[in-house]
Image (cartoon, rainbow, N blue to C red):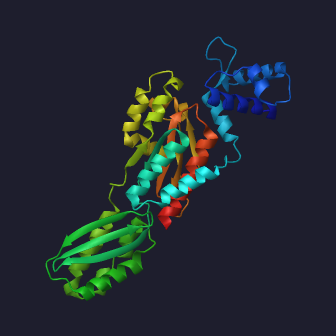
């Protein structure tokens, strides 16, 4: 597409997002320095409409972007809109004040909703995708042992084990050391094989305890309990009701189905790049008039350990939403890594 028509499309998208009103050629001439006559702009708009990038919602002279037009606009974004100093300060201050993982996730989702004025969605860090940071074995009594598992994403899981024979503190210390030496930095899927022969390093009378601890560790890391999300900013969607041709009821119902959102987030954000799904690109019919901006976070690898993003109408400030999603994900990854 000719650069000038891209400029016209970009101007239409920006104006429509800002004003909520269909954009006409006269408004484009007045608001933007496109360097061509109104007649040329009208001709460009006709070509854009014929190509399916904009459409006329009613008999007025104004045009609005289509899903195809938004897609081209997003694909042409070569740089992220920089965050203001106040926004960067707010992100850093809010996230660094968190006291534990639950607090971090709650603060993150509220922050993302405030920055973007959309519905924010944050998935809890996945145990399966996390790497092990530390395992602590804490004797609670002569026959009771607490297994504490800490991942690189900040997840902390605990399992209390009842044992038949009195605990030997020396054996507990040695087992703790061997588990950490063999498993720190490994992904959950690799822990079982890494610790497979640990029991053989202990005397026969201590092997049942070792087997119990290793089993508890591997079973905990295989849990599916991490497949949950936290949301904030649903009121922002209600304020955007006029952006949906139908009621927002189906969108709200889709938000309640966490399985739907988790699937969408995983399909979109397969690495640490910011992905955008617009309107009809969403496979769930209830979200055919919504857009989702998402990325992965945490874990120190390209695929991350979980996803976060925002959902709103297709009439979304994509540059700002993409910038905020990426910035919050990076800050969150940094906080969890620390």
> Looking at this view, is 71 or 77 the one in front?
77
Image label count: 0
Q: Quadrant of residue 187?
A: bottom left
Q: Position of residue 117 (x, y in %)?
A: 52, 38
> Looking at this view, is 167 or 197 the one in front?
167
- Left or right: where 338 falls relative to 138: right
> Looking at this view, is 65 or 198 the one in front?
65
- Left or right: where 1 falls relative to 310: right
Residue at 63% across / 35% down in the picture? Answer: 71
Q: Position of residue 293 (x, y in %)?
A: 55, 42
Residue reaching furthest to the top:
59
Q: Position of residue 29 (x, y in %)?
A: 79, 24
Q: Is residue 303 in view from this perspective?
A: no
Location of residue 42 with respect to 168 vertically, above or below: above
Location of residue 302 with respect to 37 vertically, above or below: below
Location of residue 20 with respect to 168 vertically, above or below: above
Location of residue 275 with respect to 66 vertically, above or below: below
Q: Is residue 101 in view from this perspective?
A: yes
Q: Quadrant of residue 184?
A: bottom left
Residue at 56% across / 57% down in the picture? Answer: 330
Q: Position of residue 55 (x, y in %)?
A: 65, 21
Picture quarter with the N terminus: top right
- Left or right: where 259 falls relative to 84: left
Residue at 70% across / 40% down in the picture? Answer: 76
């Amino acid at each position: 597409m000719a650069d000038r028509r891209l400029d016209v499309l970009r101007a239409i998208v920006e104006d429509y997002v800002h004003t909520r009103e269909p954009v006409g050629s006269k408004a484009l001439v007045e608001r933007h320095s496109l360097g061509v006559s109104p007649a040329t702009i009208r001709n460009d708009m006709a070509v854009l409409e014929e190509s399916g990038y904009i459409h006329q919602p009613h008999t007025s002279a104004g045009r609005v972007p289509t899903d195809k037009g938004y897609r081209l606009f997003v694909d042409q974004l070569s740089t992220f809109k920089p965050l203001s100093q106040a926004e960067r300060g707010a992100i850093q201050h809010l996230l660094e004040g968190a006291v534990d993982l639950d607090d971090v996730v709650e603060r993150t989702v509220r922050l993302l909703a405030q920055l973007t004025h959309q519905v924010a969605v944050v998935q809890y860090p996945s145990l399966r995708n996390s790497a092990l940071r530390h395992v602590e074995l804490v004797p609670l009594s002569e026959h009771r042992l607490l297994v504490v598992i800490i991942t690189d994403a900040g997840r902390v899981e605990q399992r209390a084990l009842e044992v038949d024979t009195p605990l030997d503190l020396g054996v507990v210390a040695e087992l703790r050391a061997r588990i950490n030496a063999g498993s720190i930095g490994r992904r959950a899927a690799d822990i079982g094989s890494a610790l497979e022969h640990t029991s053989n390093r202990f005397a026969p009378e201590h092997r049942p305890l070792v087997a119990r601890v290793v089993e508890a560790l591997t079973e905990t890391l295989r849990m599916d309990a991490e497949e949950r999300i936290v949301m904030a900013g649903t009121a922002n969607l209600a304020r955007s009701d006029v952006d949906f041709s139908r009621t927002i009821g189906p969108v709200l119902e889709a938000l309640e189905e966490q399985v739907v959102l988790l699937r969408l987030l995983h399909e979109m954000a397969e690495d640490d790049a910011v992905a955008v799904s617009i309107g009809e690109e969403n496979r769930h019919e209830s979200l055919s008039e919504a857009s989702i901006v998402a990325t992965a976070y945490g874990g120190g690898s390209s695929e991350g350990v979980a996803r976060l993003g925002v959902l709103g109408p297709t009439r979304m400030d994509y540059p700002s939403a993409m910038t905020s999603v990426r910035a919050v994900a990076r800050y969150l990854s940094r906080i969890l890594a620390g």
